[in-house]
Image (tube, rainbow, N blue to C red):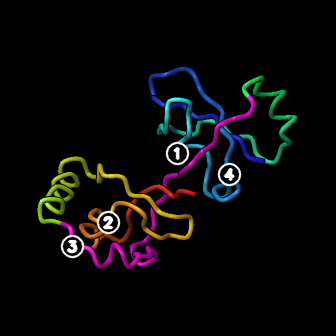
Amino acid sequence: MKYVAVKHKPEHTNVWWFMVPDELCDKVSVGDEVICATSRGKAKGKVVQMMDGISQESAERIIGNHFPLKSVVAVSVELPLSDIHIPLVLASSNPSEEKISKRIHEFYKYGKFNTPVIYSTDGTLRDGYTAYLVAKMFDHDTLKGFSSI
């Protein structure tokens, strides 16, 4: 089993422990940005510590009485555009010029897309189609997003 300590804001001193589901185990490492299920909903954070290959009983002794732990639901990944699978429902849609223009503006202003880009663990795009289209339009090699279960 893999467990990670996540800091949700850089200025915070507290870390929170989360379980990593099997589907994401090989993708999560220290320094990665993750999305976690919390009691207040989903929250982004950065992995600052990790315990891998230990039993739940050992983790409970180390972490304390916070069990059962909530889990990591997504991890930041950067996929080559050529490896991203676009479902037919997205490929047959026609996003408005306003949405495309907004993605272009985001990228030039911030150097990244502010819209969430979400992939299945197999690389299928689930959200962020306009960001994908803009990245392709400007011949980007990759698109950063979150791999989610």
Earlier-in-chain disc, 1 versus 2:
1
In the depicted structure, whether residue 124 falls above or below residue 21: below
Task: Determine the secondary structure under disc 1.
Answer: strand
Q: CA distance from mark 1 to mark 3?
A: 30 Å
Look at the numbered discs 1 and 3 and tell me whether their residues touch, using CB distance below 8 Å: no
Earlier-in-chain disc, 3 versus 4:
4
In magenta segment, residue 72: yes
Look at the numbered discs 3 and 2 and tell me whether their residues touch, using CB distance below 8 Å: no
Pointer 1 local density, CA inside 10 Å: few below 14, some 14–19, many at least 20: many
The residue where tag 3 is placed is 94
Q: Give me the residue at 53% from left, 51% from top.
A: 75
Look at the numbered discs 2 and 4 and tell me whether their residues touch, using CB distance below 8 Å: no
Query: Which x, y percent locates residue 149?
Result: 58, 57
Query: Which x, y percent locates residue 118?
Result: 43, 58
Based on the displayed image, in which of its 4 quarters is residue 56 positioned? top right
Task: Determine the secondary structure under disc 4.
Answer: loop
Tag in front: 3 or 2: 3
Q: Of the residues shown, which amino acid type is indicated by label 2?
A: Tyr
Residue 82 numbered tag: none
Q: Of the residues shown, which amino acid type is indicated by label 1?
A: Val
Which residues lie in the magenta part?
67-95
Based on the displayed image, in which of its 4 quarters is residue 90 positioned? bottom left
Task: Determine the secondary structure under disc 3.
Answer: loop
The residue where tag 4 is placed is 21
In magenta segment, residue 26: no
Q: CA distance from mark 1 to mark 4?
A: 12 Å
Look at the numbered discs 1 and 2 and tell me whether their residues touch, using CB distance below 8 Å: no
Query: Which x, y percent locates residue 60?
Result: 81, 30
Q: Judge left or right: residue 73 versus residue 25.
A: left
The residue where tag 2 is placed is 129
